[in-house]
Image (cartoon, helix red, strand yellow):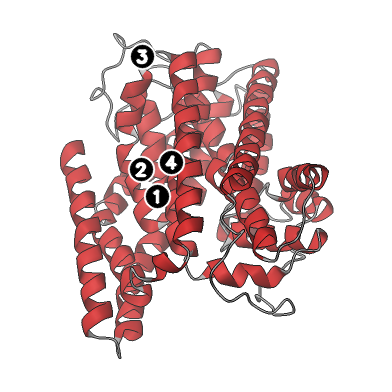
């Protein structure tokens, strides 16, 4: 079934490119309307994903933490997770900075630059440390659920789970309910994923029909440089995976094929969340760990997005011939380490973060107008990279905690949605 699903996704991507190009070339007068209509299918799928994300995250996270046991274990797992996220973010930001300085994609930009005073329409004041800290705590868990605020759901779920763990006798009935909810949500996830190939076809068709493949040539140097930097980041992540986890890491990469293609084709890391969680549990990572680390990763460990922030910001400075000494670039990196956190679920989050950062360093915000037209094509690579980074982080923390089952204990097809893993609160 897994291989067949992968084939369906690949076929949908190819078909989407062919049909999108045909619409763009042969129906130029109506391509925007057609793209809008077709994209509705993809949007409905993403809304289905959003529909299940909040209860899925809450149920799996509460179950995982409550079954984790003592507070010291929770604190240890959190410290290791956060340490990995900070390190990975720093490496991603630094790699983007190094690559954009080596490649100099904006040094001889052939296109016309937007006027410095032009507005992008992005909320450049959206991110600050104060606003992030205030936003961290939900005023209402119902509102956080309704808005799919993953980070706020995580905060409430941690308090809720710790309280459950502190009252083992009284919480038995609630724990049973939470575990049942996790089973049900994973079953619903299986139903939603049946629509994934159709959604992939719609997303690719709409993108190509509206923009055409020719738009890529206008910024081919920038795109080529960015995807080269992404490839190097993948090499680093995969190498670290083999060093820490060993040869069996190749099995995890195989399990991540479906979520990677989902994230790439829909340009949404969120769309791949359920499949990523399933793949990690099939790999043998304890659901106690995966249900804790993965939701946090969606707010704190967006490796692809991190690298894009420094790469795009310095690229814009290069196009306007603005000199950025090393000290200034390092100051920008430090700023982005803070402003880029908690952006999961924010539309065009990376652009908003970049816009707010550019204004702080005297770089024209209007420079973003050059790359906004191809942002979807860039977001495809960013989203896929976020998936590989978060799956690696979860597997590594599971191994550090001794919560990664040995290969002889768990085969690649031993667990499917609806099954229960002995000792784990949710099925894989």
Residue picked out by circle 4 = 181
Residue at image location 66% in from the left, 76% down from the top? 121
Residue 263, numbered circle: 1
Q: Where is residue 185 drawn, in percent x and y?
A: 39, 44
- Figure quadrant of residue 45: bottom left
Point out the tag, 2 or 3, that comes first from the N-terminus: 3
Residue in the foreground of this view, choosing between 416 and 15: 15
Rendered view: 170 above or below 12: above
Residue picked out by circle 3 = 247
Q: Residues within 10 Å of mark 3 (few under 14, many from 20)?
A: few
- Figure quadrant of residue 352: bottom right
Residue in the foreground of this view, choosing between 54 and 127: 127
In-image side of 427 versus 318 (left or right): left
Q: Residues within 10 Å of mark 1 (few under 14, many from 20)?
A: many
Residue picked out by circle 2 = 259
Assign a secondary structure to mark 3: loop
- Asked if disc 2 and disc 1 are in contact, CB closer than 8 Å, the reply is yes
Rendered view: 83 above or below 13: above
Locate the C terminus and report the quarter of the image it occupies.
top left
Q: Residues within 10 Å of mark 4 (few under 14, many from 20)?
A: some
Residue in the foreground of this view, choosing between 181 and 106: 106
Residue at image location 48% in from the left, 35% down from the top? 232
Assign a secondary structure to mark 1: helix
Assign a secondary structure to mark 4: helix
């Amino acid at each position: 079934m897994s291989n067949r699903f992968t084939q369906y996704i690949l076929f949908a991507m190819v078909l989407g490119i062919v049909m999108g190009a045909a619409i763009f070339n042969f129906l130029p007068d109506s391509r925007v309307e057609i793209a809008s209509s077709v994209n509705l299918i993809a949007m409905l799928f993403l809304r289905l994903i959003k529909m299940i994300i909040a209860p899925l995250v809450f149920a799996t996270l509460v179950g995982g933490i409550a079954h984790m046991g003592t507070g010291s274990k929770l604190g240890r797992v959190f410290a290791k997770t956060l340490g990995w996220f900070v390190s990975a973010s720093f490496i991603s930001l630094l790699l983007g900075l190094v690559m954009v300085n080596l490649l100099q994609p904006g040094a001889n930009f052939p296109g016309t630059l937007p006027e410095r005073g032009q507005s992008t329409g992005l909320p450049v004041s959206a991110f600050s440390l104060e606003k992030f800290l205030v936003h961290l705590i939900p005023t209402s868990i119902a509102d956080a659920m309704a808005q799919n605020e993953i980070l706020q759901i995580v905060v409430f779920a941690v308090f809720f789970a710790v309280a459950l763990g502190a009252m083992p006798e009284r919480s038995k009935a609630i724990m049973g309910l939470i575990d049942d909810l996790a089973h049900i949500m994973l079953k619903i996830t299986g139903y939603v994923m049946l629509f994934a190939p159709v959604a992939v076809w719609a997303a690719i068709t709409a993108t190509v029909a509206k923009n055409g493949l020719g738009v890529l040539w206008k910024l081919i140097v920038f795109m080529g440089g960015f995807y080269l930097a992404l490839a190097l980041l993948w090499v680093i992540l995969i190498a670290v995976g083999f060093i820490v986890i060993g040869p069996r890491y190749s099995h995890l990469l195989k399990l991540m094929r479906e979520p990677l293609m989902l994230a790439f084709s829909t340009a949404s890391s969120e769309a791949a969340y359920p499949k990523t969680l399933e793949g990690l549990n099939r790999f043998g990572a304890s659901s106690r760990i995966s249900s804790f680390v993965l939701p946090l990763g969606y707010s704190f460990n967006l490796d692809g997005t991190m690298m894009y922030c420094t790469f795009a910001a310095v690229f814009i400075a290069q196009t306007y011939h603005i000199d950025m000494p090393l000290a200034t670039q390092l100051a920008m990196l430090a700023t982005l380490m803070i402003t880029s956190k908690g952006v999961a679920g924010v539309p065009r989050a990376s652009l908003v973060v970049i816009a707010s950062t550019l204004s702080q360093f005297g770089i024209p915000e209007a420079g973003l107008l050059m790359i906004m037209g191809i942002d979807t094509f860039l977001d495809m690579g960013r989203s896929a990279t976020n998936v590989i980074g978060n799956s690696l982080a979860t597997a590594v923390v599971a191994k550090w905690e001794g919560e990664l089952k040995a290969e002889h204990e768990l085969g690649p097809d031993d667990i499917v949605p609806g099954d229960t893993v002995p000792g784990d609160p949710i099925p894989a």
